[in-house]
Amino acid sequence: MNGFLDGKKILVMGVANNKSIAWGCAQAMEKQGAEIIYTYQNERLKKFISKLVDDENRLIECDVASDESISQAFSKVEDRFGKIDGIVHAIAFAKKEELGGSILNSTREGYNQALDISSYSLLAVAKAGQKILNTPSSIVTLTYMGSSRALPNYNTMGIAKAALESGMRYLARDMGEEGTRVNAISAGAMRTLAVSGIKGHSDLIKISQSETVDGVNVTQEEVGNTCAFLMSDLATGITGDVIYVDKGVHLR
Protein backbone atom coordinates (compact mmCIF):
# COMPACT_ATOMS: atom_id res chain seq x y z
CA MET A 1 0.00 0.00 0.00
CA ASN A 2 1.60 3.25 -1.13
CA GLY A 3 0.71 6.91 -0.89
CA PHE A 4 -1.27 6.92 2.35
CA LEU A 5 0.52 10.11 3.41
CA ASP A 6 -0.08 11.96 0.15
CA GLY A 7 -0.55 15.68 0.74
CA LYS A 8 0.62 15.61 4.37
CA LYS A 9 3.37 17.85 5.73
CA ILE A 10 5.33 16.42 8.65
CA LEU A 11 8.00 17.97 10.84
CA VAL A 12 10.83 15.62 11.86
CA MET A 13 12.96 16.69 14.82
CA GLY A 14 16.13 14.83 15.72
CA VAL A 15 17.92 13.59 12.60
CA ALA A 16 21.64 13.47 13.44
CA ASN A 17 22.84 11.36 10.49
CA ASN A 18 21.67 8.65 8.11
CA LYS A 19 21.74 6.05 10.91
CA SER A 20 19.27 8.01 13.06
CA ILE A 21 15.93 6.36 13.70
CA ALA A 22 14.43 9.76 12.85
CA TRP A 23 15.97 9.49 9.38
CA GLY A 24 14.38 6.07 8.94
CA CYS A 25 11.04 7.59 9.91
CA ALA A 26 11.49 10.48 7.48
CA GLN A 27 12.38 8.15 4.62
CA ALA A 28 9.41 5.87 5.26
CA MET A 29 6.99 8.80 5.41
CA GLU A 30 8.42 10.41 2.30
CA LYS A 31 8.00 7.09 0.51
CA GLN A 32 4.30 7.27 1.38
CA GLY A 33 3.97 10.73 -0.16
CA ALA A 34 4.61 13.06 2.79
CA GLU A 35 6.48 16.34 2.50
CA ILE A 36 9.12 16.32 5.23
CA ILE A 37 10.44 19.36 7.08
CA TYR A 38 13.49 18.98 9.34
CA THR A 39 14.86 20.78 12.37
CA TYR A 40 18.49 20.83 13.48
CA GLN A 41 19.90 22.00 16.81
CA ASN A 42 22.74 24.26 15.69
CA GLU A 43 25.08 25.08 12.81
CA ARG A 44 27.43 22.22 13.68
CA LEU A 45 24.67 19.65 13.31
CA LYS A 46 23.28 21.39 10.25
CA LYS A 47 26.41 20.30 8.39
CA PHE A 48 25.41 16.65 8.84
CA ILE A 49 21.75 16.96 7.89
CA SER A 50 22.61 19.17 4.90
CA LYS A 51 24.38 16.15 3.41
CA LEU A 52 21.07 14.27 3.51
CA VAL A 53 18.63 17.06 2.61
CA ASP A 54 19.61 19.35 -0.26
CA ASP A 55 16.61 21.68 0.00
CA GLU A 56 17.68 24.46 2.37
CA ASN A 57 14.09 25.64 2.71
CA ARG A 58 13.16 22.42 4.52
CA LEU A 59 15.85 22.87 7.19
CA ILE A 60 14.93 24.94 10.25
CA GLU A 61 17.06 25.58 13.31
CA CYS A 62 15.52 24.60 16.65
CA ASP A 63 17.22 24.10 20.01
CA VAL A 64 14.62 22.46 22.26
CA ALA A 65 16.45 23.67 25.36
CA SER A 66 15.20 27.17 24.50
CA ASP A 67 11.52 28.15 24.41
CA GLU A 68 12.46 31.14 22.26
CA SER A 69 14.17 28.90 19.72
CA ILE A 70 11.16 26.56 19.62
CA SER A 71 8.78 29.48 19.10
CA GLN A 72 10.91 30.94 16.30
CA ALA A 73 11.21 27.54 14.63
CA PHE A 74 7.47 26.92 14.53
CA SER A 75 6.87 30.44 13.25
CA LYS A 76 9.27 29.70 10.39
CA VAL A 77 7.54 26.38 9.69
CA GLU A 78 4.19 28.18 9.46
CA ASP A 79 5.60 30.96 7.29
CA ARG A 80 7.15 28.52 4.83
CA PHE A 81 4.66 25.65 4.82
CA GLY A 82 1.44 26.79 6.50
CA LYS A 83 -0.32 24.23 8.67
CA ILE A 84 1.26 20.81 9.13
CA ASP A 85 -0.13 17.36 9.79
CA GLY A 86 2.33 15.83 12.19
CA ILE A 87 5.47 16.06 14.31
CA VAL A 88 8.08 13.36 14.94
CA HIS A 89 9.92 14.08 18.19
CA ALA A 90 13.14 12.05 18.17
CA ILE A 91 15.24 14.08 20.58
CA ALA A 92 17.07 12.81 23.66
CA PHE A 93 20.31 13.59 25.46
CA ALA A 94 22.18 12.64 28.59
CA LYS A 95 25.83 13.11 29.44
CA LYS A 96 28.03 10.03 29.05
CA GLU A 97 28.72 10.15 32.77
CA GLU A 98 25.01 9.48 33.37
CA LEU A 99 25.01 6.37 31.15
CA GLY A 100 27.23 3.88 32.91
CA GLY A 101 27.65 2.03 36.19
CA SER A 102 25.34 2.83 39.09
CA ILE A 103 22.38 5.20 39.07
CA LEU A 104 23.90 6.55 42.29
CA ASN A 105 26.48 8.27 40.11
CA SER A 106 23.75 10.49 38.67
CA THR A 107 24.20 14.20 39.31
CA ARG A 108 21.54 16.86 39.80
CA GLU A 109 22.81 18.78 36.80
CA GLY A 110 22.97 15.72 34.55
CA TYR A 111 19.58 14.48 35.69
CA ASN A 112 17.90 17.83 35.09
CA GLN A 113 19.48 18.17 31.66
CA ALA A 114 18.41 14.68 30.59
CA LEU A 115 14.83 15.25 31.74
CA ASP A 116 14.69 18.69 30.10
CA ILE A 117 16.00 17.64 26.68
CA SER A 118 14.58 14.12 26.54
CA SER A 119 11.19 14.59 28.18
CA TYR A 120 10.07 18.17 28.75
CA SER A 121 10.96 19.05 25.16
CA LEU A 122 8.02 16.95 23.95
CA LEU A 123 5.62 19.11 25.98
CA ALA A 124 7.30 22.30 24.77
CA VAL A 125 7.18 21.20 21.14
CA ALA A 126 3.54 20.11 21.40
CA LYS A 127 2.59 23.44 22.97
CA ALA A 128 4.19 25.39 20.12
CA GLY A 129 3.00 22.93 17.50
CA GLN A 130 -0.68 22.89 18.42
CA LYS A 131 -1.13 26.31 16.81
CA ILE A 132 -0.15 25.04 13.37
CA LEU A 133 -1.38 21.42 13.46
CA ASN A 134 -4.26 20.41 11.23
CA THR A 135 -7.23 18.33 12.35
CA PRO A 136 -6.65 15.42 12.41
CA SER A 137 -2.93 15.35 13.16
CA SER A 138 -0.41 13.15 14.90
CA ILE A 139 2.61 13.48 17.18
CA VAL A 140 5.01 10.54 17.56
CA THR A 141 7.93 10.36 19.97
CA LEU A 142 10.62 7.71 20.40
CA THR A 143 11.22 5.78 23.59
CA TYR A 144 12.94 2.58 24.77
CA MET A 145 12.03 -0.18 27.19
CA GLY A 146 14.64 1.11 29.64
CA SER A 147 11.73 3.30 30.73
CA SER A 148 10.10 0.37 32.51
CA ARG A 149 13.07 -1.91 33.18
CA ALA A 150 16.31 -1.21 35.03
CA LEU A 151 18.63 -2.05 32.14
CA PRO A 152 22.41 -1.99 32.63
CA ASN A 153 23.94 1.48 32.20
CA TYR A 154 20.78 3.12 30.79
CA ASN A 155 20.26 4.82 34.15
CA THR A 156 19.24 8.49 33.91
CA MET A 157 18.00 8.08 30.35
CA GLY A 158 15.66 5.32 31.51
CA ILE A 159 14.12 7.72 34.00
CA ALA A 160 13.87 10.40 31.31
CA LYS A 161 12.12 7.97 28.94
CA ALA A 162 9.65 7.02 31.69
CA ALA A 163 8.83 10.70 32.09
CA LEU A 164 8.56 11.05 28.31
CA GLU A 165 6.01 8.24 28.11
CA SER A 166 3.96 9.73 30.92
CA GLY A 167 4.03 13.14 29.25
CA MET A 168 2.91 11.50 26.01
CA ARG A 169 -0.18 10.08 27.72
CA TYR A 170 -1.15 13.42 29.26
CA LEU A 171 -0.69 15.12 25.89
CA ALA A 172 -2.88 12.48 24.25
CA ARG A 173 -5.61 13.28 26.76
CA ASP A 174 -5.40 17.05 26.40
CA MET A 175 -4.75 17.32 22.67
CA GLY A 176 -7.33 14.74 21.66
CA GLU A 177 -10.11 17.31 21.85
CA GLU A 178 -8.34 19.21 19.06
CA GLY A 179 -7.99 16.08 16.94
CA THR A 180 -4.31 15.43 17.64
CA ARG A 181 -3.17 11.91 18.47
CA VAL A 182 0.00 11.43 20.51
CA ASN A 183 1.87 8.11 20.66
CA ALA A 184 5.33 6.70 21.31
CA ILE A 185 7.33 4.06 19.48
CA SER A 186 9.56 1.90 21.66
CA ALA A 187 12.22 0.89 19.18
CA GLY A 188 14.57 -2.03 19.60
CA ALA A 189 18.29 -1.47 20.07
CA MET A 190 20.23 -0.58 16.93
CA ARG A 191 23.46 1.19 16.08
CA THR A 192 22.77 4.91 16.32
CA LEU A 193 24.71 7.92 17.55
CA ALA A 194 22.50 8.01 20.66
CA VAL A 195 23.15 4.37 21.57
CA SER A 196 26.91 4.81 21.16
CA GLY A 197 26.93 7.05 24.23
CA ILE A 198 25.83 4.21 26.51
CA LYS A 199 28.58 2.25 28.25
CA GLY A 200 28.70 -1.27 26.84
CA HIS A 201 26.40 -0.40 23.95
CA SER A 202 27.81 -3.17 21.73
CA ASP A 203 26.83 -5.76 24.33
CA LEU A 204 23.39 -4.15 24.60
CA ILE A 205 22.81 -4.60 20.87
CA LYS A 206 24.05 -8.21 20.93
CA ILE A 207 21.81 -9.08 23.88
CA SER A 208 18.86 -7.40 22.20
CA GLN A 209 19.44 -9.43 19.04
CA SER A 210 19.59 -12.68 21.01
CA GLU A 211 16.20 -11.89 22.55
CA THR A 212 14.33 -11.11 19.33
CA VAL A 213 11.88 -13.78 18.21
CA ASP A 214 13.79 -14.41 14.98
CA GLY A 215 17.37 -13.64 16.05
CA VAL A 216 17.52 -10.50 13.90
CA ASN A 217 17.50 -6.95 15.24
CA VAL A 218 14.82 -4.52 14.14
CA THR A 219 15.76 -2.10 11.36
CA GLN A 220 15.41 1.62 10.75
CA GLU A 221 12.96 0.84 7.99
CA GLU A 222 10.70 -1.23 10.24
CA VAL A 223 10.54 1.51 12.85
CA GLY A 224 10.02 4.07 10.11
CA ASN A 225 7.11 2.14 8.62
CA THR A 226 5.38 2.10 12.00
CA CYS A 227 5.90 5.84 12.33
CA ALA A 228 4.40 6.36 8.86
CA PHE A 229 1.36 4.34 9.88
CA LEU A 230 0.89 6.31 13.11
CA MET A 231 1.12 9.56 11.15
CA SER A 232 -1.55 8.44 8.72
CA ASP A 233 -5.33 8.51 8.87
CA LEU A 234 -5.15 4.70 9.11
CA ALA A 235 -4.27 5.18 12.80
CA THR A 236 -7.01 7.59 13.87
CA GLY A 237 -8.12 5.20 16.62
CA ILE A 238 -4.72 5.00 18.31
CA THR A 239 -3.59 7.55 20.89
CA GLY A 240 -1.77 7.52 24.22
CA ASP A 241 -0.03 4.24 23.39
CA VAL A 242 3.51 2.92 23.39
CA ILE A 243 3.94 0.78 20.28
CA TYR A 244 6.80 -1.72 20.58
CA VAL A 245 8.83 -2.20 17.40
CA ASP A 246 11.60 -4.47 18.71
CA LYS A 247 10.99 -7.94 17.24
CA GLY A 248 9.52 -9.11 20.55
CA VAL A 249 12.44 -8.23 22.85
CA HIS A 250 9.99 -6.65 25.32
CA LEU A 251 8.30 -10.06 25.73
CA ARG A 252 11.31 -11.57 27.50
Image (cartoon, rainbow, N blue to C red):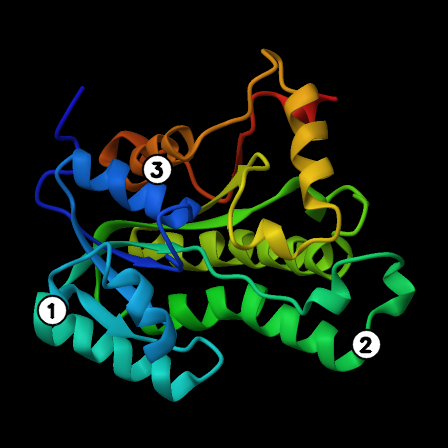
Residue 130 shows in the view: no
Question: Does 203 appear above or below 152?
Answer: above
Helix, strand or loop status at disc 1? helix
Can you give x and y, in whole percent of width and height, for residue 75 in the image?
21, 79
Picture quarter with the N terminus: top left
Identify residue for label 1: 57
Residue 107 is marked as 2
What is the distance, in whole Å, between disc 2 and disc 3 at their CAs? 36 Å
Helix, strand or loop status at disc 2? loop
Residue at 38%, 32% in the rendered image: 226
How packed is label 2: few (under 14 Cα within 10 Å), some, or many (20 or more)? few
Can you give x and y, in whole percent of width and height, for residue 17 in the image?
37, 54
Residue at 69%, 53% in the rendered image: 198
Give whichever of discs 1 and 2 has the lower sequence position.
1
Which amino acid, by three-letter code, is at mark 2? Answer: Thr
Residue 230 is marked as 3
Residue at 64%, 69% in the rendered image: 115
